[in-house]
Image (spheres, rainbow, N blue to C red):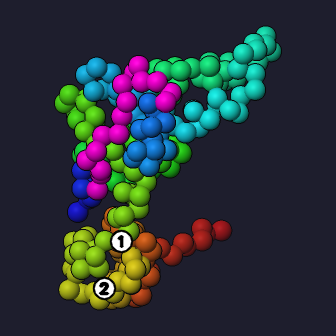
Amino acid sequence: MSIEVKDVMGRVAIAVLEDASFADIVAAMKRYAVGAVTVVDADQRPVGVVSEDDLLLKETDPARHAVSMFESRRQRHEHEKAAGVRATQLMTSPAITVTPGTSVRDAARLMHDRRIKQVPVIDVVTGRIVGTLHQHDVLGVFTRPAAELETDVKAVLADPESFTIEIDKGVVTVSGRVQWRSQAIALVEAVRAVEGVVDVVARITAGNDDLVVVPPLL
């Protein structure tokens, strides 16, 4: 069974309005102990995100009042952010979002690829923010109860009664026998894809090797 964002997300939508001041943003981050806040419009739809890195430009950008004809587009953008005082000036846009129905695996991949620690969750119909998915919410999948994890592992096996399943801290050991070596490989990959599986130890024997590469005849 695929675990979706709605199963692990935080129900508090950590957001500020577009005209929120620098101080308002810092206060929101401090109140909820987060490193970023979503910026929403009047209809509660995400339009961007302000992170701690965006705010730190106030201190780390020594040339925010000086403009050089040789600076890159990125440098100019950072100078503009450093001079900003409202959410719309400070935010990174557009906002990267997920929906309650997004799989946790896909959300984790998105967060890893974009190097972000939290994403707003939006209603698929209205586009309004309904919650926040944090990195620790995703990592919580790896602390699932062993019995629950075993049920999902058995669900991906064609004949679960033919195998012995042992689970220790998310590491799944599968023991048994299959007819073909390719079946053993496919079985391991299927178990590895189950949300919450940290690693797979395969103790599976195969009656036949259908992956032997036959050298071409000379």
* Range drawn in magenta: 8-23
Residue at the spot of label 1:
143
Q: Are marks 1 and 2 in contact (CB under 8 Å)?
A: no
The quarter holding residue 168 reads bottom left
Q: Is residue 110 visible?
A: no
Name the residue at 57% across, 20% down.
Answer: 84
The reply to whether the magenta stretch includes residue 163 is no
Q: Which mark is residue 119?
A: none
**Left or right of residue 217: residue 37:** left
Name the residue at 33% across, 44% down.
Answer: 132
Q: Is residue 44 visible?
A: yes
Find numbered disc 1 in the image and state the secondary structure of the residue it sits on.
Answer: helix
Name the residue at 30% across, 85% down.
Answer: 165
Magenta-drawn stretch, dominant element (helix, strand or loop): loop
At label 1, counting other C-alpha atoms closer than 10 Å, the crowd grade (few under 14, some 14-19, many 20 or more) is few
Q: CA distance from mark 1 to mark 2?
A: 17 Å
Q: Which mark is residue 165?
A: 2
Q: How many marks?
A: 2
The quarter holding residue 97 reads top left
74, 161: nearer the viewer: 74
